[in-house]
Image (spheres, helix red, strand yellow):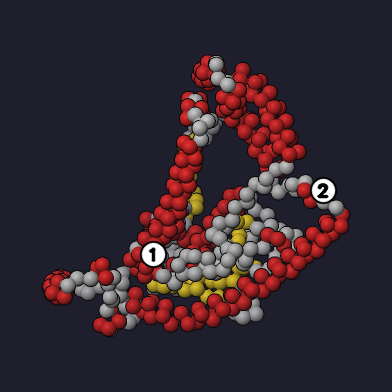
């Protein structure tokens, strides 16, 4: 997920239910890798490093005694070392200086996206042909945009086929429909299957326990706290939940996804359906996400599929005294002249899941400060996740099976990373010139600046 040149957040909208990319070229995160720098640029960085070394020499006088002791210890260790070791120690000292780090970061930021110099060296006639290739690439981007528009139409078509099944799921959850014995039969995995005699014994025991419970209390209706349990099982959503949100979410009966009508701008709406409750009078809370599937004229090569451009929530009609998105605080104020103290009551925003329905507004110019951009990026990610994963697979998040699948995906990635690290270590050990002592970090490097 990343902020595009047009101010939208690009997301991998069309993904297979397994979590794998449904179409080549999409990814859950897009990184801006720093391009390789030409020799001229490298020399420029070397000059900057020399300047920053001068800065470091000046700043050493301002370091506190503890830091100077560390530096002195490093210098003592340098005695008798070769030039490479001295250069490594100097680098450590330089990288501990905040001014040097800031200057280096500023320099790297200026280099990001800069031309390599190769294009400038090409003959004019070759540059002309490269421009022709770029024009072809722009046309490819527009064709790709049409492709995603048709995919959206296809998704809308199949959403209509899914909906009767989701409606029946909702009816079971809220006790509007009682499934038959045949519908309730579920064949366990082979590893979990028991012998016939053992199954009969378990069924008889379960039957007795159920009869005993029925005598003690009334049979629960539907599946209590279904959606609340789903939310609590998913880290992305549970982080939004507060203790005061849980009594309200117990009344959540269904979440639906509605797509924009054919011919209308691309968008989708999340509908949260609630049963009557004491907290607000709304029966449905909505969150609409507007998307765009066309290359940005100012930067057509950045197009990588549909982008969420903005979102809009809804007004919650809270019952008096039940608004969990606000809290009342009392502050004591002392009069400067008379010295009298008075208590002032203020209403301030409160952390709550229901702030999800009042997102920051995107200005017409599309420019956002860093905080608003971060909030919207997280909001778009949550909306996309609810649409793509939670609604289609709610029962698996309720049971925790989908969580295990997600964890398995992360474990596989971690194992691959461990394998790569192991290969690097093996390469170092096989290097006859490798000296592990030289790679040992000096004590000063471990200090947090």
Q: How many discs appear?
A: 2
Kindly identify the residue that appears in the image at 51 percent across and 35 percent down. Answer: 431
Q: Residues within 10 Å of mark 2 (few under 14, many from 20)?
A: few
Above or below, 277 against 437 in this view is below
- Which is nearer the eye, 353 or 421? 421
Above or below, 109 against 336 in this view is below
Residue 212 visible in this rendered orientation of the protein: no
Element on which disc 2 rests: helix
- Which is nearer the eye, 325 or 145? 145
Element on which disc 1 rests: helix
Q: Real-space Cα distance between discs 1 and 2? A: 54 Å
- Image spot of residue 5 (x, y percent): 69, 57
Upstream in sequence: badge 1 or badge 2: 2
- Which residue is labeled 1 in the image? 402
Seen as rendered, the residue at the extreme front is 432
- Which is nearer the eye, 412 or 93? 412
Kindly identify the residue that appears in the image at 71 percent across and 49 percent down. Answer: 113
- Which residue is labeled 2 in the image? 121
- Image spot of residue 135 (x, y percent): 78, 65
Kindly identify the residue that appears in the image at 70 percent across and 32 percent down. Answer: 46
Residue 191: quarter of image: bottom left
Left or right? Give the position of 280 relative to 60.
left
């Amino acid at each position: 997920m990343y902020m595009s040149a047009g101010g939208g957040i690009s997301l991998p909208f069309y993904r297979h239910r397994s979590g794998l990319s449904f179409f080549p070229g999409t990814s859950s995160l897009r990184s801006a890798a720093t391009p390789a720098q030409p020799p001229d640029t490298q020399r420029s960085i070397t000059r900057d490093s020399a300047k920053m070394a001068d800065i470091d020499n000046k700043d050493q006088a301002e370091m506190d005694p503890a830091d100077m002791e560390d530096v002195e210890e490093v210098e003592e260790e340098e005695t008798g070392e070769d030039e490479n070791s001295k250069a490594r120690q100097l680098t450590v000292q330089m990288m501990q200086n905040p001014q040097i780090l800031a200057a280096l970061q500023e320099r790297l930021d200026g280099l990001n996206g800069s031309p390599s110099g190769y294009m400038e060296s090409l003959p004019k006639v070759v540059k002309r042909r490269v421009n022709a290739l770029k024009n072809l690439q722009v046309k490819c981007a527009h064709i790709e945009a049409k492709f995603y528009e048709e995919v959206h139409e296809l998704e809308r078509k199949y959403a209509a086929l899914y909906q009767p099944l989701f409606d029946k799921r909702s009816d079971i959850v809220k006790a509007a429909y009682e499934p038959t014995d045949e519908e309730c039969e579920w064949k366990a995995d082979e590893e979990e299957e028991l012998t016939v005699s053992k199954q009969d014994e378990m069924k008889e025991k379960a039957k007795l326990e159920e009869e005993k419970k029925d005598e003690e209390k009334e049979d629960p209706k539907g599946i209590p706290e279904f959606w609340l349990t789903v939310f609590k099982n998913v880290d992305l959503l549970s982080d939004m939940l507060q203790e005061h949100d849980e009594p309200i979410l117990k009344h959540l009966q269904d979440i639906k996804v509605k797509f924009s009508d054919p011919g209308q701008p691309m968008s989708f709406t999340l509908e949260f359906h609630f049963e009557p409750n004491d907290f607000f009078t709304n029966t449905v809370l909505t969150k609409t996400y507007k998307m765009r599937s066309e290359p940005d004229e100012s930067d057509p090569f950045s197009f990588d599929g549909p982008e969420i451009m903005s979102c809009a929530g809804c007004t919650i009609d809270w019952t008096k005294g039940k608004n969990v998105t606000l809290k009342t605080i009392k502050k004591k104020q002392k009069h400067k002249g008379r010295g009298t103290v008075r208590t002032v009551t203020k209403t301030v925003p409160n952390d709550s899941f229901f702030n999800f329905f009042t997102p920051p507004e995107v200005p017409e110019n599309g420019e956002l400060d860093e905080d608003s951009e971060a909030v919207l990026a997280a909001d778009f990610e949550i909306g996309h996740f609810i649409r793509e994963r939670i609604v289609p697979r709610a029962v698996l998040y309720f049971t925790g099976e989908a969580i295990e699948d997600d964890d398995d995906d992360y474990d596989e990635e971690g194992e691959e990373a461990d394998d790569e690290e192991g290969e690097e270590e093996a390469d170092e050990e096989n290097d006859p010139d490798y000296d592990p002592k030289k790679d040992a970090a000096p004590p000063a490097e471990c200090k947090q600046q």
